[in-house]
Amino acid sequence: MITPVILCGGSGTRLWPLSRAHMPKQLLAVHEQATMLQATARRLSDFNASTSTPPIVVCNDAHRFVTRRQLQEIGEGRAELIAEPTGRNTAPALTLAALRSRQTHPQADPVLLVMPADHVIADLAEFQRIVAIALRATQRGNPAGDAIVTFGIVPTEPATGYGYLKVGRTSAFDPAAYVLETFVEKPDLERAKEYVAGGDYLWNSGLFVLRASVWLRAMATLEPEMLAACEAAMVKANVVGEDVLPDPALFAACPANSIDYAVMEKLSAHPDLHIQGAVIPLNAGWSDIGAWDSAWAIAEKDDRGNAAIGEAIFESSNNTYVRTSGSNAPVVACVGIDDAVIVQTPDAILVVSKDHAQDVKKVAALLSARSDKRADAHRKVERPWGWYDSLGSGADGAGFQVKHISVYPGQALSLQLHHHRAEHWVVYKGNATITIGERVQTYKAGEHAYIPLGAVHRLANETDELVELIEIQLGDYLGEDDIVRLDDRYRRG
């Protein structure tokens, strides 16, 4: 039995302004039409395994609803979703998944294929071939003991943005696997050149194949406090449909650590565990798109190395990447621009030379330090019920604000009121069911509703088509915290 485990955490700050804290890169279509999460969930869709289960997706609770919606869009509605109350890095995330896999399949010992949600793999056939080798290496009864297999990416350049794996002799688990000798942190350029030239170093992919019982056994010895906190949080978890919500207070006691530091780097010092790290080389067009120079590297380019997503004009320019977004995105004209990245979103523009792409995270940190909402959210904000796009407001956000609101079929905003603003709603698509006080009425495209200050109200879509409207807020304070929720199906405060 193989169970894909998709780790859907991380902030992706080096891909700002496209990636934001509330909508990180794994939930965005950075390289394909599908989002990175969706592409990862499809990675084993045609894999020839005798038994497989729906994936387990571990995400932040703040991203629970958009993650579930994206999975449903690609037919993966049966995926189990574990929503972490707080981020604790990859080792606790994998531990929660391993515990859940044993809960749901108590008679089996699932093999977990652990995949970060923010990777690109171009050659799926080669990837699946390597996964099949890893499955053989993790079977029970191997005289060499138990294996935790990781995939080492065959380097294409002396990259300084990746950690490295040093491999040794051929592993006893499979002729295609090697003994994992050590992990190496991101090197400087000269050291990276030495690693690539030596031939016994591979990029650290963050991909793993292992049996759930083997991981839990390793955790019991190497990280008992972490395992205990995860077990306690899962025992008290709230299960809502296919969503598992670990107990927030109990999970808060869990230490934070990565899979590499918590377990993989410690295995060689604990031979009594009879668990060995093994590495299988992978050459399948892998990228983690960790920064904008990586996005340029895998993009389709013209004969001068320029790439564009959106409308761009390149004149006497070379090796430049342009990306625009939004329904009214501008044309970007590059004249005499070399080795640059230009990214436009409706509320921000980034211009950076490719050799400084790793420093973009400093911009996101600076915005966050001064409490600028552009570090965390786009102008278009996802909600469990749909989304809204802030189109404009008065000076300093006072007086008025205009929003474009879209409500998904069968969804509804909370029953709520505001202390500081009144609202006008103009429906322009679909049939909206609007509650104002005791009155419930359906409004069609072209019709208008007025919600006085302090009035109890709700907007709902009871149809199977989108409902869209323009909202005009008027008041002396227009912040999102001026929402008093009286009833909310999504259990928000």
Image (cartoon, rainbow, N blue to C red):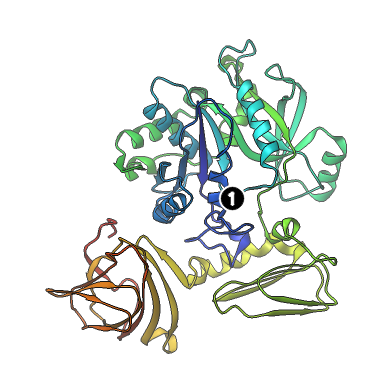
The residue under the point 67% across, 80% down is 331
Please tell me which residue lies in front, 355 or 174: 174
Residue 258 in the image: state x and y as whole percent: 56, 39
Quarter holding the C terminus is bottom left
The residue under the point 57% across, 49% down is 39
Residue ranking furthest to the left: 438
Residue 242 lies in quadrant: top left
Residue beneath label 1, please? 118
- Total numbered labels: 1
Residue ranking furthest to the right: 197
Q: Is residue 359 above or below residue 148?
A: below
Q: Amino acid at mark 1?
A: Asp
**In this image, 289 relative to 441: left or right?**
right
The residue under the point 36% across, 87% down is 400
Q: Is residue 383 above or below residue 175?
A: below
The residue under the point 61% across, 16% down is 271
Please tell me which residue lies in front, 125 or 189: 125
**Crowding at mark 1 (Cα within 10 Å: few <14, some 14-19, many 20+):** many
Residue 15 lies in quadrant: bottom right
**In this image, 251 relative to 455: left or right?**
right
- Secondary structure of the residue carrying tag 1 is loop
Residue 3 in the image: state x and y as whole percent: 50, 32
Q: Is residue 153 above or below residue 305?
A: above
Residue 471 in the image: state x and y as whole percent: 34, 80
**In this image, 335 relative to 405: left or right?**
right
Residue 248 lies in quadrant: top left
